[in-house]
Image (tube, grey):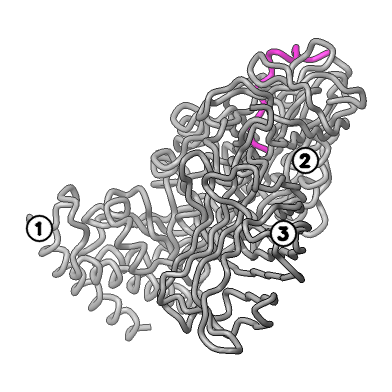
């Protein structure tokens, strides 16, 4: 034990010497925006190592004394550490304030523990009250739900219990199943930028600061082990005390304050409901931050250290009851809270422990008529939009785009509608989509009228023409490929009408050739899924000598090529390819021909003579 004490003391002395430099150097001002220096990062890592050494010393002391005495002994050792301003024994371990602002500690006695068999749903008297009018309910506008469980390895049973029951509750009212992140996957970044979620559940450890007898701050444990990359990115937060590094289960992990959480999250966008499943989660500024600063509609938490089974029971009951669609009107959080047993007596702490909530009393998780999602969220006129939700009924009613009633409804069920976007909106306009049944409207969901894409424009075209020019290497020597063309700039009548099937378009027709042959033409074109490129083309024309002319016999041309990008020219859409690299494009084109001049087939294309392949899509008003 003496050897361990000496090693800890030596580390402390070295850290103190470095901190003198840290604290005195103007270059190390956290407000300069230059980031931490290499020396500062090394010092931070030395402090993390000292916490590991203190933990090892604590483990050794447990062989000689009880836990309380071992904590007191470690604090006594820390009192000689010049880098530490103070260290304080708490119910859960030892909290440490370092001289340069960083906070740390040893999380030795987690008060929230997993329980195998005692998790049972609460049975509150929710009654048959009419509840609040639907128009007054506050409901999350995103169907996405998130479960963050940094301590999943410790609370596996409780977390799985909540995940299982949450899934069945959410499916009744149109929410997605929980997206789950556990243990190390709950890194610091995972607690930032949560605005997309409708329901957020956090299950972890909470640490009171400076102690449970004087709670000024409560920190939430993440699943990320301290490392140089994150130390660098969040150095100012660490130094300011907003992101302590506290040792838990033998690893230094990042913990975050409500102030840190508030800086990175706007929960007002989707009226998010937040369930905080960690000790002291209703204290230390968490509800104020989540409601007043982040803008969530409601927040649940605890006014003391809470057992995992109690937390699991309340959480299941909350989701079950607020997703109960057998009620005439949805249960609100205020009504739920008034009906449950919201307090239990803890023999461990000889005090009452309560679940609490903050936010809007009228927060609910569903309304009788509700849109949960639309897809896509942008498109042009006639784009087919899929609307998912609850309460639409089996009889077709109305879908509104702003105040325009959609007239082309393809599918209507109680939970799904497929409808075409009506005309009359400017490109780039953001319209509000609602469903109206028996005079009652759903929540509104934004839909953006998109700028025309290549595919959108293509579907306004009704004719196609193809032209290929280039010299070829034939089986009987060099030669010029007879012009393969079913269109020209001054012969609009030679375009062929289009037939669309998904992303494939075909054209069939007869054209009169200038060579006294009549040609039967067949074209098949496959476009990329986004309509931005031609994936493949096969075009054939079979010629028959026109009676009464000098032409005799027949001829045949076939053209096939791939991977041609689109451009727009003179009101038409043109797919155009012009190359000079002979070798790399010999497989891109296949041409064969026979005729009165003798049969031949393509062996390669001489792109060196600026051969070109072109598809020209065009809109032609036959009535003009």
Question: Where is residue 107 drawn, in percent x and y?
Answer: 48, 61
Magenta highlight: main SS: loop
How many labels sit on residues? 3
Q: Residue at x 46, y 54 (%)?
A: 189
Determine whether, in the image, residue 172 is placed left or right of residue 211. right
Question: Pointer 1: what residue?
Answer: 27
Q: Nearer the viewer, residue 610 or 196?
A: 610
Does the magenta run of residues contain 142? yes
Residue 136 picture quarter: top right
Question: Where is residue 611 drawn, in percent x and y?
Answer: 46, 69
What distance separates the C-alpha of mark 2 from that of mark 3? 77 Å
Question: Pointer 2: what residue?
Answer: 170
What distance separates the C-alpha of mark 1 from that of mark 3? 94 Å
Task: Tell me where the magenta segment starts and ends, as one range.
Answer: 130-143
Q: Which of marks 1 and 3 is in front?
A: 3
Who comes first in sequence, dot 2 or dot 3?
2
């Amino acid at each position: 034990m003496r050897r361990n004490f000496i090693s800890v003391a030596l580390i402390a002395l070295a850290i103190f010497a470095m901190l003198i430099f840290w604290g005195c150097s103007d270059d190390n001002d956290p407000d300069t925006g230059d980031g931490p220096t290499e020396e500062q990062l090394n010092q931070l890592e030395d402090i993390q190592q000292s916490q590991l050494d203190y933990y090892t010393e604590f483990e050794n002391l447990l062989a000689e004394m009880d836990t309380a005495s071992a904590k007191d002994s470690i604090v006594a050792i820390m009192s000689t550490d010049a880098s530490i301003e103070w260290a304080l024994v708490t119910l859960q371990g030892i909290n440490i304030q370092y001289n340069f602002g960083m906070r740390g500690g040893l999380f030795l006695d987690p008060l929230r523990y997993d329980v195998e068999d005692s998790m049972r749903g609460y049975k509150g008297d929710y009654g048959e009250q009419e509840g609040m009018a639907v128009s007054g309910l506050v409901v999350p506008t995103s169907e996405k739900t998130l479960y963050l469980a940094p301590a999943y390895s410790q609370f596996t049973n409780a977390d799985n219990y909540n995940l299982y029951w949450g899934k069945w509750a959410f499916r009744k009212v149109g929410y997605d199943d929980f997206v789950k992140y556990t243990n190390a996957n709950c890194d610091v970044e995972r607690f930032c930028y949560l605005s997309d979620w409708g329901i957020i559940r956090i299950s972890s450890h909470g640490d009171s600061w400076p102690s449970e007898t004087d709670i000024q701050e409560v920190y939430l444990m993440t699943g990320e082990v301290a490392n140089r990359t994150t130390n660098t990115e969040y150095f100012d937060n660490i130094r300011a005390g907003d992101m302590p590094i506290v040792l838990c289960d033998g690893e230094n992990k990042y913990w975050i304050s409500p102030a840190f959480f508030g800086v990175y999250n706007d929960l007002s966008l989707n009226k998010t409901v937040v369930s905080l499943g960690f000790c002291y989660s209703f204290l230390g500024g968490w509800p104020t931050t989540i409601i007043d600063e982040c803008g969530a509609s409601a927040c649940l938490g605890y006014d003391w250290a809470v057992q995992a089974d109690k937390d699991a029971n309340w959480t299941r009951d909350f989701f079950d009851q607020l997703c109960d669609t057998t009620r005439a009107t949805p249960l609100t959080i205020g009504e739920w809270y008034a009906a449950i047993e919201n307090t239990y007596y803890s023999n461990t702490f000889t005090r009452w422990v309560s679940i609490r909530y903050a936010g809007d009393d009228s927060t609910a998780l569903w309304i009788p008529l509700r849109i949960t999602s639309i897809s896509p969220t942008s498109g042009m006129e006639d784009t087919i939009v899929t609307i998912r939700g609850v309460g639409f009924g089996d009889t077709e009613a109305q879908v509104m785009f702003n105040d325009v009633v959609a007239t082309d409804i393809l599918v209507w069920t109680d939970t799904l509608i497929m409808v075409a976007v009506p005309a009359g909106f400017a490109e780039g306009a953001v319209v509000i989509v609602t469903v109206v049944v028996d005079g009652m409207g759903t929540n509104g969901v934004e839909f953006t009228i998109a700028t025309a894409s290549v595919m959108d424009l293509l579907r306004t075209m009704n004719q196609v023409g193809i032209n290929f020019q280039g010299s070829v290497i034939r089986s009987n020597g060099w030669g010029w490929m007879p012009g393969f063309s079913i269109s020209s700039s001054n012969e609009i009548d030679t375009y062929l009408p289009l037939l669309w099937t998904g992303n494939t378009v075909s054209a069939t027709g007869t054209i009169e050739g200038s060579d006294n042959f009549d040609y039967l033409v067949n074209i098949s074109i496959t476009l990329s899924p986004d309509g931005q490129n031609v994936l493949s083309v096969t075009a054939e024309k079979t010629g028959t000598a026109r009676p009464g002319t000098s032409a005799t016999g027949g001829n045949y041309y076939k053209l096939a090529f791939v991977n041609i990008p689109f451009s727009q020219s003179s009101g038409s859409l043109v797919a155009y390819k012009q190359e000079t690299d002979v070798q790399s494009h010999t497989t891109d084109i296949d041409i064969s021909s026979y005729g009165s001049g003798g049969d031949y087939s393509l062996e390669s294309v001489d792109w060196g003579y600026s051969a070109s392949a072109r598809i020209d899509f065009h809109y032609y008003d036959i009535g003009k």
